[in-house]
Image: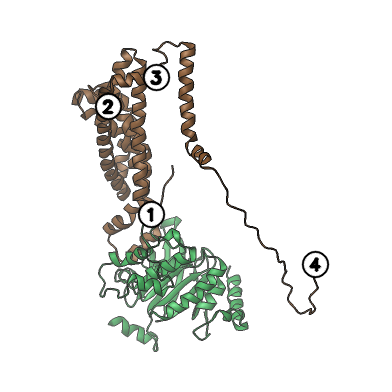
Amino acid sequence: MTAVAPDSTVSAVPASRAKAVIPPAERTSALMRAFRMTRAWLLLALAVVAWEVAVRVLDTPKYILPAPTAMYDAFREHTDLFLTGMWATTRMSVYGFFFAVVVGTALGVLMARSALFEELAFPFLNIIRVMPTIAVAPLLIIWFGRGGVPIVICSFLIAVFPIIVDVTHGLTSVNEDLVNVMRLANASELSILLRVRIPNALPYLFSSFRVAAPGAVVGTLLGEYIGSREGLGYLITVYSAQLNTAAVFVLAMLCCLVGIVFFNVCLFAERFVVPWKSVVR
Amino acid sequence: MTTQLSTETREAPTQALVSLRDVCIVHGRGPDAVVAVEGVDLDVRPREIISIVGHSGCGKSTLLRAIAGLQPHASVQGSLEILGQDPEAARKSGLMGMVFQESVLAPWRTVAGNVRLPQQVARGRASKPTKTPSEMLELVGLKGYDKRYPKQLSGGQRQRVSLARALAMEPQVLLMDEPFGALDEITRDEMHSELLRIWDTTHTSIVLVTHSIQEAVFLSDRIVVMAAHPGRIADLITVDFPRPRRTELKDDPEFARIAHRIRTSLEDNR
């Protein structure tokens, strides 16, 4: 240590002269960064290669487990048919989802704003909710024929309930003191609904889409399975009856693709419309 | 106005802005009924800062909400008037602004959008507020923060926005329910001086509910000490420090003496 302070009245501030050392920035090569960004995909590619090799080495029958190359061939063979089917499924899912959003939001608003409506409607909604859609679908086909209507209804039925529940929750979970601020300005109930309750419910609505959007696709596939002349669900019934397993695999992957696109469009819309909050379920 | 006449007969020099006579507040009915506040007489004068201190659950927040016209009409007994109007009518004509412990800002609106919100929805007011959100934000020391979002602000800054939102409506009475209770002590000290500076530029009276004895003594002209079960006024203390008050006042022996009196009064009325 250096010399002691000569005057005892000098305040005893600890006099360390140590300077902090700033660690240098981390250095990674471009190749390493590219690897880090793509490693999940590389793993997937590796799995596909392993699959192909395993099928060839073990000589598995084609109708049990087709090789990825066989699936690719099946897709090449029926490209137009499959893409038309995918487009039909997408369209029906969009309709079902759209009606689910409209009806679900309307019912949610009614349930949140009117205790009487909630009391009267709740048992009926709950019955419809627990009723398996697969049990209702044949009935819908008897009533509406083998067209698009029963398919859209199936899609709607699966998508609508998460929307009702979350919209109701979003409208009622407003901070009461924010509502009080509005009351102190003598705001009407309508402007409280439009300017406070509905914006507050938007993150909840979008969070319900994470369940409802893939649900709408599942509902559509279900409807197509049971009675339709188009769509991925219908094509799966046709090719599985023919034991064309490669085609069924391709169709299943296309179903996944539709679901993933739906989910991500909603996720993107959520970030765009409600940047202030994300209700994670 | 007839009310003016009646208050003049009661109190000659200053007309009360808020006048409470025999106010009782009862929650519920029948055997489950709870008496939250009983027999409160109090006048809030123009341009006065009055604090209500008391233990948790002594009914001080309930009393504040009753003044704001936010308590169910049936639960409030006695006479409660703001400039001769009952609380609900006073609320509807925009005489009151309120700041809560939480800033309760709308996260989807910008800071300026939050200040503007009450102005956008206000109905039935004689005059439109004259100050713009930007001017209000400048007043509370947040110049240039218009386009920020609440989550980008600190707790103290959010509370300033909340204050700007309440004052944007140019209220006669500003009701504050533990407004600095959620802030850290350094920020709270800063907000005390800021509140006095801002209050000085307005015409408003302040009714402040607080847990902090220091806060009450530093800010108030008068302090109401409330006792619980049922909530009632236990003591009314006048604080005569001249204004403007500076933070150094908190180290004044007289300041400590008043704080001590409040503390004793609170302990006697547990």
| 1 or 4: mark nearer the eye | 4
Q: Label 3 marks which chain's residue?
A: A
Residues under numbered marks 1 and 4 in contact, where contact means CB atoms less than 8 Å apart:
no
Q: How is the image coloured?
A: by chain
How far separated are the C-alphas under marks 1 and 2? Answer: 45 Å
Is label 2 in a helix, a strand or a loop? helix
Is label 3 in a helix, a strand or a loop? helix
Residues under numbered marks 1 and 3 in contact, where contact means CB atoms less than 8 Å apart:
no
Instruction: Say which residue label 2 marks.
Output: A83
Question: Percent position (x, y) of residue B34?
Answer: 46, 60
Identify the colour of chain B in the image.
Answer: green
How far separated are the C-alphas under marks 2 and 4? Answer: 81 Å
* Label ID, residue A174: 1
Residues under numbered marks 2 and 4 in contact, where contact means CB atoms less than 8 Å apart:
no
Q: Looking at the image, is mark 1 or mark 2 earlier in the sequence?
A: 2
* Residue B167 visible to the viewer: no
Q: Label 2 marks which chain's residue?
A: A
Q: What quarter of the picture does the C terminus of chain B occupy? A: bottom right
How far separated are the C-alphas under marks 3 and 4? Answer: 76 Å
Identify the colour of chain A in the image.
Answer: brown
Question: Percent position (x, y) of residue A279?
Answer: 42, 47
How far separated are the C-alphas under marks 3 and 2? Answer: 19 Å
Would you place residue A153 above or below residue B153 in this image?
A: above
Residues under numbered marks 3 and 2 in contact, where contact means CB atoms less than 8 Å apart:
no
